[in-house]
């Protein structure tokens, strides 16, 4: 991550703070609603599904607003909306109605924020290519690792402190955006105007959008599979006697390995520049992680599977927004990043539901076999998505 512009470093720092705050809360939502507020797991799952649905709506709106109006105003609105809801939640979290509504509001506000962050990274550092999106991805996972690790200790003292810490870091993120992001709006506009291709080489919007949908179909499958680690696989580890603290450790391994493993990613990306190949290799590694998880019955085996999973996601997750940025016609960067983030949220929303149904009706072994079969789809979607947008020979 050396050699990045100051603006990208600012995005990285802001992202880490924002995600750390959010990660105090999201791993504990189900536990709090079920154990502290006395609601069923089905109710908690339904509220979290609405949270992800609101995030999808926010992704699409945030991406569109990035293209239509100021990126600074868009991200300020989304951040302010989420921050206000988080502050109110810190005061009213013992009321289930308020809790549910505010959690959905946070999902919507945060949803507006993320496509703007990714689109700004791609717009103000176009020559960075994958590195710009990888920087935001690494910052997100550093925040997840810090928040999930620290949050567990804070929750053991009092859940009240979790909501206060969540609101405090949302406020810090809002202030960073308010006082430092406005100059990046001008930088983004300048870069976008200097990277416009000539009309004969510009991809038509309709063709590019179809290509994006094909690419994202595979991305949806990978997220649906990945989300099983937070739902069905999490429940399975409890069923076979792995303590909750050890399961939480798996996510700390995930987050910190993503940060510490960046030299490996840099080495690989320096030798293989094709983002398609990154997805092929990463998806193969993801399949390997589920194959190991399928035969795991100890914490050590699940830790090995998590390490393999993490290596795979380090290659796949940044590659998709990078390809979306390359596909996006002029002045559609935000919308395309909104689509990518929406697809990821849709995978996180539907994956646990479908996985839970399969496990309830059949067994987790069948789920693993289905996941291994479904993970073949990204090979085809990645191979075929750009067949209609490759530069064609032009007559004189």
Image: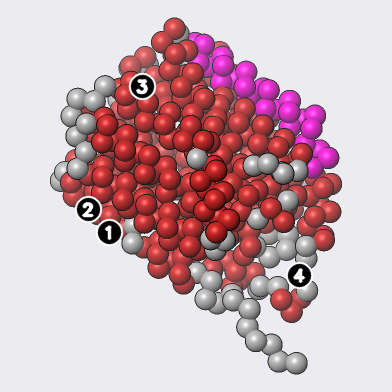
Q: In this view, does 28 lie to the left or right of 71?
A: left
Task: Report the Cα–Cα distance between label 4 and label 3.
Answer: 51 Å
Residue 379 position, x and y percent, is 40, 64
Q: How crowded is mark 3: few (under 14 residues within 10 Å), some or many (20 or more)?
A: some
In space, the residues marked 3 and 1 are separated at their CA atoms by: 32 Å
Q: Position of residue 356 (x, y in %)?
A: 26, 41
Image-based side of 82 in relation to 40, left or right: right
Q: Is residue 114 above or below residue 126?
A: above
The residue segment tinted magenta is 160-184
- Residue at 55 percent of width and 77 percent of height: 388
Q: SS at mark 3?
A: helix
Residue 159 visible, this angle:
no
Q: Nearer the viewer, mark 3 or mark 2?
A: 2
Disc 2: which residue: 369
Question: Which dot marks residue 9?
Answer: none
Label pair 2/1, CB-CB below 8 angstroms: yes
Magenta stretch: includes residue 182: yes
Q: In which quarter of the image is the C terminus?
A: bottom right
Q: Nearer the viewer, residue 353 or 195?
A: 195
Residue 233 seen by the camera? yes
**Residue count near mark 2 (Cα–Cα under 10 Å), binned few <14, some 14–19, many ≥20:** few
Task: Return the residue at label 1.
Answer: 373
Q: Earlier in the sequence, mark 1 or mark 4?
A: 4
Please identify, in this view, whether the residue under mark 3 or under mark 1 is nearer the observer. Answer: 1
Residue at the left extreme, as displayed: 362
Residue denoted by label 4: 197
Badge 3 is on which residue? 31
């Amino acid at each position: 991550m050396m050699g990045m512009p100051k603006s990208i470093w600012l995005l990285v720092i802001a992202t880490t703070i924002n995600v750390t705050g959010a990660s105090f809360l999201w791993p504990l939502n189900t536990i709090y609603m079920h154990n502290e507020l006395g609601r069923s797991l089905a109710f908690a799952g339904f509220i979290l599904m609405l949270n992800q649905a609101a995030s999808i709506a926010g992704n699409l709106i945030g991406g569109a607003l990035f293209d239509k109006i100021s990126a600074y105003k868009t991200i300020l609105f989304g951040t302010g909306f989420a921050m206000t809801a988080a502050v109110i939640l810190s005061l009213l979290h013992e009321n289930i109605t308020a809790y549910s509504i505010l959690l959905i509001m946070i999902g919507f506000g945060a949803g507006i924020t993320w496509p703007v962050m990714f689109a700004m990274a791609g717009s103000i550092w176009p020559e960075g290519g994958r590195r710009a999106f990888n920087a935001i991805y690494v910052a997100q996972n550093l925040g997840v690792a810090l928040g999930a690790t620290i949050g567990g200790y804070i929750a053991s003292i009092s859940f009240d402190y979790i909501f206060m810490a969540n609101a405090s870091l949302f406020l810090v993120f809002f202030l960073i955006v308010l006082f430092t992001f406005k100059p990046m709006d001008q930088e983004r506009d300048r870069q976008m105007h200097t990277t416009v291709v000539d009309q004969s080489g510009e991809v038509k919007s309709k063709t590019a959008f179809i290509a994006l949908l094909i690419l994202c179909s595979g991305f949806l499958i990978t997220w649906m599979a990945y989300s099983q680690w937070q739902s069905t696989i999490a429940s399975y580890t409890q069923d076979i006697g792995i303590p909750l603290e050890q399961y939480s450790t798996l996510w700390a391994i995930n987050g910190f390995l993503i940060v510490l493993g960046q030299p490996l990613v840099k080495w690989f990306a320096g030798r293989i520049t094709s983002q398609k190949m990154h997805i092929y290799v990463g998806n193969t590694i993801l399949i390997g992680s589920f194959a190991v998880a399928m035969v795991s019955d100890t914490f050590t085996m699940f830790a090995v599977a998590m390490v393999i999973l993490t290596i795979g996601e380090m290659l796949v997750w940044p590659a998709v927004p990078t390809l979306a940025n390359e596909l996006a016609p002029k002045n559609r960067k935000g919308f395309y990043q909104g689509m990518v983030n929406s697809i990821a949220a849709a995978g996180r929303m539907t994956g646990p539901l479908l996985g839970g149904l399969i496990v309830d009706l059949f067994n987790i072994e069948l789920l693993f076999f289905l996941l291994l079969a479904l993970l073949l789809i990204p090979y085809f979607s990645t191979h075929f998505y750009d067949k209609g947008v490759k530069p064609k020979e032009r007559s004189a």
